[in-house]
Amino acid sequence: MAAHLSSGRVNLTALREAGRRELREFLDKCAGSKEHEVEKMFTLKPGRLPQADVKNIIFFVRPKLELMDIITDNVLREDRGRSPQRDFHILFVPRRSLLCEQWLKEQGVLGSFIHREQYSLDLIPFDGDLLSMESESAFKECYLESDQTSLYHAAKGLMTLQALYGTIPQIFGKGECARHVANMMIRMKREFPGSQNSIFPVFDTLLLLDRNVDLLTPLATQLTYEGLIDEIYGIQNTYVKLPPEKFAPKKQGEGGKDLPTEPKKLQLNSAEELYAEIRDKNFNAVGSVLSKKAKIISAAFEERHHAKTVGEIKQFVSQLPHMQAARSSLANHTSIAELIKDITTSEDFFDNLTVEQEFMSGIDTDKVNNYIEDCIAQKHPLIKILRLVCLQSVCNSGLKQKVLDHYKREILQTYGYEHVLTLNNLEKAGLLKPQTSGRNNYPTIRKTLRLWMDDVNEQNPNDISYVYSGYAPLSVRLAQLLARPGWRSIEEVLKMLPGPHFEERQQLPTGLQKKRQHGENRVTLVFFLGGVTYAEIAALRFLSQMEDGGTEYVIATTKLINGTSWIKSLMEKLEPAPF
């Protein structure tokens, strides 16, 4: 089931098993859940609970007040006269909340819960090299609300990792949040001296990176296969929902009748061989791989005509399930690639990308952009406008006051004055702000870190800039330079980026110091505080696979994001007063 979690350099199945064990222990406490016989799972929604012939009902929730209202509604609508009576339990993920319990008490339902506990599911393994906390509001909480709860959970998650995979000897970090997480880890280690374990360390280095050190990368359109699927359709917990028309089996003579109406839901991870091969490629390189695969599969099916002996036929039949799975996978990804191509070949996509690339390469970032003005006049989706305006602001170290005021006025007059709070949030987060120092540092940062590459090779890349067809993600460039030659070489640029940079060393018990074999790669865990995009993940995987790279990367984050979901998390709409 989870073979893809153990396929990387670090076997993440151990983390998954630890999470399952803790959940089983809770289920054991709920009397009657024999052998953890979970009858059914439902999404939490208001109203009566769904019909199910069960004794125990477990609410499995994040500690949020709006969810407590739904639970209250569920419990109050429960028929108390029914027999047998049902028992309620609540499991908070990842931590119990006194505020939520107080709320349930005020609503008069707290006493209905037999067990109220917490389930410390901080980091969830998504793939063999990818962990996420899936905390949607982490960026907003840290940078707008000065709420460090998600940073505490990140530190807890890292302590759990160290308990399973050994103490990480070196910690590097950049940014205020990174500093907080490192401090919390050091404090937790001091407060729980028993946490010093005798496991041989799997990770050599931990790199903690604040999202606000690199605000540029998530705003740009990702151009890898997986990145574009996320940009266009949105990947939720490794699943994507796609328009069904492309996936309907074509039967002869039936025309287009009886097309499915339900979206096609597909799981996307490295357990699928073809997806693992194409996910991190630039979209322009995907077509040739798919056509090569089609030829190989078609040749494999042709083999059946050459199978003469019983032995040969038996061998062909034994390979059949794998071949059919490969054919089905190829059909799915060919359909997805066609859907994406319809969008990437459109004039609007091209114009949008051209403006993005002009900004990232430093062209005309200091004046009002005609394309953005046209988009506002044609009332294009607001998020698209905000992404472009924020990108221009970040690539210019803030906009001149006159330019900023012009954009704000245009946006509010076209989309409504209720968006004034959103603009305020974007300013607070540093995404859309006036240029205060009168100096634009971005060109210096761009040149020193080689963030823009003119001669990018999309088919056979030799640099991480292929993931954005020219732009190398700043965050990943920092990780690359840390591994070789080290951050001392870019000291001046690091000072221009927000927040402190630091290094901590954790003492290892005697006998656990790593003696590296000749040719053995180092393992670095890169933790993005505030979210990471699939394009950045692709760039880090590219570095892991480089022949002379010397470092393999495992990625952890508070949330998997793209520009749209990230801006959406910062948007606030003033609701008109109910008169």
Image (cartoon, rainbow, N blue to C red):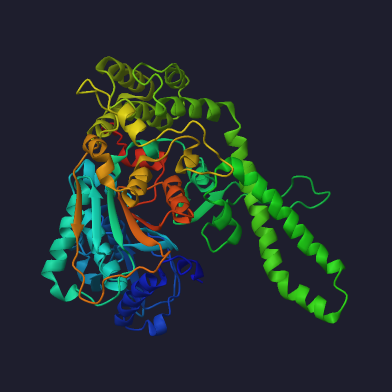
User: Which residue appears at 40% of the width and 29% of the height?
Assistant: 360
Answer with the quarter of the image where residue 192 lies: bottom left
Can you say which quadrant of the picture contains the C terminus?
A: top left
Q: Residue at coordinates 49% horizontally, 45% vertically from top-left?
A: 227
**Left or right: residue 546 compared with residue 24:** right
Q: Measuring 63% from the left and 51% from the top, which residue is drawn there?
A: 333
User: 200 or 130, which lies in front?
Assistant: 200
Q: Position of residue 424 (x, y in %)?
A: 24, 30
Left/right of residue 370 with respect to residue 569 in the rendered view: right
Task: Tell which of 285 and 550 is nearer to you.
Answer: 550
**Marker count (numbered):** 0
Q: Position of residue 507 (x, y in %)?
A: 18, 67
Examine the rendering and report whether any part of residue 338 can be seen: yes
> Which residue is painted at 45% across and 75% down in the image?
39
- Asked where in the image residue 425 lies, by quadrant, the reply is top left
90 or 83: nearer the eye?
90
Q: x, y percentage for residue 166?
A: 28, 71
Left or right: residue 240 compared with residue 503: right
The quarter holding residue 206 reads bottom left
Q: Residue furthest front?
A: 518
Q: Residue furthest left?
A: 191
Residue 120 shows in this picture: no
Image height of 168 relative to 84, above or below: above
Q: Is residue 322 above or below residue 346?
A: below
Q: Position of residue 292 (x, y in %)?
A: 70, 51
